[in-house]
Image (cartoon, rainbow, N blue to C red):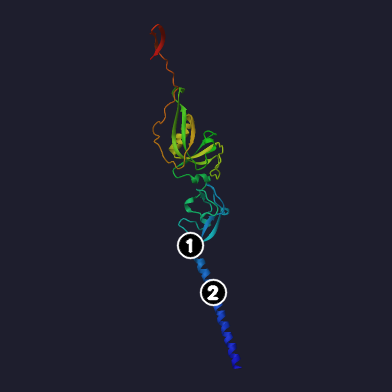
Amino acid sequence: MKVRAIITLFISLCMAGLAAMVANSWISQRLGAVEQKDQAGQVVVATADLPVGTKLDATHLKVIPLPREAISVGNLTSLDDVIGRVVTQPLYSGEILLEKRLTLHEGGSPLAVVIESGKRALTVRVNDVIGVAGFLLPSSRVDVVSTKRGSGNRSTVSKTIVENLKVLAVDQTVSSDKNDPVIVRAVTLEVTPKQAELVVKATEEGKVQLTLRNPLDMAMRDLGTDQTKAVRPVSKRRSYGYRVDVIKGIKKSRILVTK
């Protein structure tokens, strides 16, 4: 009987020890999960491709977990900080939202809040020629060339009046993911107040033409003086001269000498 009791006690102690080990492992896992959750953060990401000028709402956004050490300065972490803002640069599905790529919207058109501080939006009526055969797209860079009649309507004066303007919109499109040419009726440019005055004056006095720039070409010229002169018709000059008789032996010929 003593041997059986000892064996039973031994088995009971082993089972108790095994139960304690299992319980300890479970508690450690739970504590580790809680600690890991406390160390994790979250960020707001876009759920779809969003063009410039989009006013953000809950359907455009979601929150995903991210380790705190992976969260950078400027990453937005709360939906409340994002909803109602306007996109100032194109966003792509799954992209983490940054503070500098959004702006506050305090009313009015979403296009108004993407205009750079100190500048204005000016719309110019265009056709297939003025609009560079439809190759103008939002964010393109253009120069504005003014053409008008000179004095006495005998000459034509062409001059670049403004350089390196950003195209904010074509017609009512402020962002485009296509590169195919599209014929439009109006182009909205980002200008300073002084540039706006020059362009409006040019459209009243004659015609304006837009020229497409390479976006990497940031070279600017001094437009303070006329860079072109009036184009005048070239008149043909009359030739004047006299005739001379030339005698060689018994032959006589007459030639015209001009001057």
Q: Give the crowd class for mark 2: few <14, some 14-19, many >=20 residues within 10 Å.
A: few
Q: For residue 235, what is the image quadrant?
A: top left
The numbered mark, 1 or 2, whose residue comes first in the sequence reads 2
Residue annotated with mark 1: 68
Residue 45 x %, y %: 53, 55
Residue 183 x %, y %: 56, 37
Q: Are marks 1 and 2 in contact (CB under 8 Å)?
A: no
Residue drawn 49% across the image and 65% down it: 39
Tell me the quadrant of the picture where the C terminus can be found. Answer: top left
- Answer left or right for 43 relative to 229: right
- Residue most extreme to the bottom: 1
Residue annotated with mark 2: 27
Element marked by disc 1: helix
Residue 98 x %, y %: 49, 54
Camera-side residue: 102 or 256? Answer: 256
Residue drawn 48% across the image and 36% down it: 211
How far apart are labels 1 and 2 at the CA level? 24 Å
Relative vertical location of residue 84 with respect to residue 244 in this rendering, above or below: below
Residue 66 x %, y %: 51, 61
Tell me the quadrant of the picture where the N terminus can be found. Answer: bottom right
